[in-house]
Structures are given as C-alpha cells and as structure tokens.
C-alpha cells in the first residue's frame, strides 16, 4: 500500500511538472512609444523619491535601507530596459510604481 501511494504521488508530480512544456508561448504586450515615455518619467520620479528616502534618518538604517536599496535597483533595471528598447509588460511597470508600506 505504501509503495503504491508513493508511486502514484511521484507520477502525479511528474505529470504536473511536464504540463507547462505543452503550453503555448505567452505573448507579452509591449508599451507604445507614448506609454514608454510616460512610464520613464514616472519611474525616474519614483527612483528619485526612493533615493531621497534612503538619505533620511528613519529610512537609512537596517531592513528599511535594504528594502529601499532593492527597490532602487529594480527601478533602475526597469528604466535601463525601457531606455534600451526592450519589451516591458505594462503590469511590470504598474508593480514598480505601486507604493510600498
């Protein structure tokens, strides 16, 4: 009984892990030129705000500083990708512009 249960669970696990292989390609909508320009200005303003927060006393120590540094890095990467002409999904820009607590 125990060997049979392990075999069935293994088979189910393999079936679940192989399933994404059969899925078709996922299309990513890219931003238009106007949306790209607007997103760049908003992301740069957000990056500037995070930079200012990293210099202020309550936000320049400990885990909050690490969080802000990570956020700055992600914003910088997204800005570089937009300026480089790479395809960026609109929901990725929306996530980057969401306020954090």
Image (cartoon, helix red, strand yellow):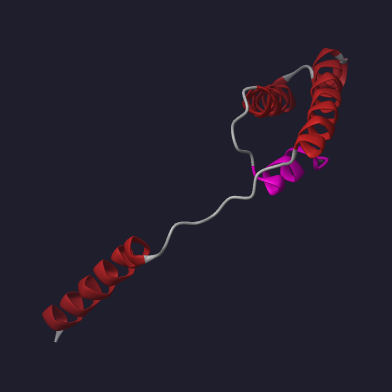
Is 39 or 5 nearer to us in this picture?
Answer: 39
Is 8 or 94 nearer to us in this picture?
Answer: 94
Residue 44 place in picture, x, y as percent: 81, 23
Left-right relation of 18 to 76:
left
Which residue, as the protein is rendered here, is positioned at the far front? 33
Question: Main SS of the magenta segment?
Answer: helix
Which residue, as the protein is rendered here, is positioned at the far bottom? 1
Q: Is residue 28 above or below residue 22?
A: above
* Residue at 65 percent of width and 26 percent of height: 70
Is 36 or 91 nearer to us in this picture?
Answer: 36
Q: Is residue 41 above or below residue 23?
A: above
Q: In the image, is residue 80 part of the stretch drawn in magenta?
A: no
For the record, the magenta segment spans 89-100
Residue 13 place in picture, x, y as percent: 28, 69
Residue 83 place in picture, x, y as percent: 68, 23
* Residue at 25 percent of width and 67 percent of height: 14
Quadrant of the image occupied by residue 37: top right
Left-right relation of 55 to 8:
right
Figure quadrant of the N terminus:
bottom left
All told, the count of numbered labels is 0
Quadrant of the image occupied by residue 66: top right
Q: Is residue 34 above or below residue 61?
A: below
* Residue at 39 percent of width and 65 percent of height: 23
Which residue, as the protein is rendered here, is positioned at the far top? 55
Residue 24 place in picture, x, y as percent: 42, 62
Quadrant of the image occupied by residue 33: top right
Is 98 or 37 nearer to us in this picture?
Answer: 37
Figure quadrant of the C terminus:
top right
Q: In the image, is residue 94 part of the stretch drawn in magenta?
A: yes
């Amino acid at each position: 009984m125990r060997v049979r249960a392990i075999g069935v669970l293994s088979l189910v696990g393999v079936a679940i892990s192989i399933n994404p292989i059969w899925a078709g390609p996922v299309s990513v909508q890219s931003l238009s030129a106007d949306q790209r320009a607007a997103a760049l200005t908003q992301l740069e303003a957000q990056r500037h705000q995070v930079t200012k927060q990293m210099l202020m006393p309550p936000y320049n120590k400990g885990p909050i500083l690490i969080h802000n540094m990570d956020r700055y890095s992600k914003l910088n990467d997204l800005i570089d990708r937009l300026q480089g002409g790479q395809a960026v999904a609109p929901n990725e820009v929306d996530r980057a512009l969401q306020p954090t607590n």
